[in-house]
Image: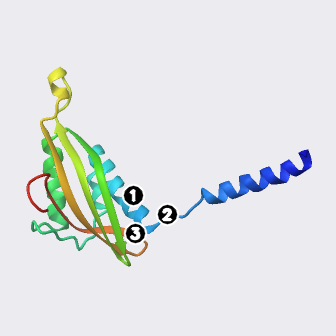
Amino acid sequence: MHKAFIPLLIMTLTLTAFGSCRKDTEEDKVRKVVAAVAEAAGEKEIKSMLGQLSRIYRDPKGNNYDGIRNLLLFYFYRHQRVSVFIARLDVTVTDRSARAQLQAVLSGARTVESAKDLLPEALGIYDFDVTFMKEGDEWKITSADWKRSGEGAP
């Protein structure tokens, strides 16, 4: 019994190890870009956020790559603490383009100096519609539209 158990155990562990080493799907890669942007926003790392944008970025609000950089600079200057929570994320991938529709809770606050500073100065739930294009092996954001939840289509 013991001799039969050892090869069975080795085979089970080997199959388990290979099964857990799956390669990321393109959808997984897009999700990671969204997570990286949210994390960078929380750390106020504009360079990291812009690293996820394509240089050909254009959005329906009239912003290009530089416009988004300026928008981030303004927001981060205005709010000393920034928090992003992704509440919902739906991703679809088609060949070399992708779309992420998400809902995010965004808040901004000043530095905590007293108990009243624990509450955010700005808090909003936003719906985002983000378009991606494959540039080399990386997914880059080429456009984004957003609105406060409940205020019409983004």
Rendered residue at 39%/58% (across/down): 32
Q: Amino acid at mark 2?
A: Asp
Query: Nearer the observer, disc 1 or disc 3?
Result: 1
Neighbor class of circle 1 (other Cα within 10 Å; few <14, some 14-19, many 20+) is some
In the depicted structure, whether residue 52 falls above or below residue 45: below
The residue singled out by tag 3 in the image is: 138
Q: Is residue 48 visible?
A: no
The residue singled out by tag 1 in the image is: 32
Quick one: SS at disc 1? helix
In the rendered image, residue 3, in percent from the top left (x then y), is placed at: 91, 49
Q: Do callouts 2 and 1 mark residues in contact (Cβ within 8 Å)?
A: yes
Name which quarter of the figure residue 27 lies in. bottom left
Rendered residue at 84%/54% (across/down): 7
Choose the circle earlier in sequence order: 2 or 1: 2
Q: Amino acid at mark 3?
A: Glu
The residue singled out by tag 2 in the image is: 24
Choose the circle earlier in sequence order: 2 or 3: 2
Quick one: SS at disc 2? loop
Q: CA distance from mark 2 to mark 1?
A: 10 Å
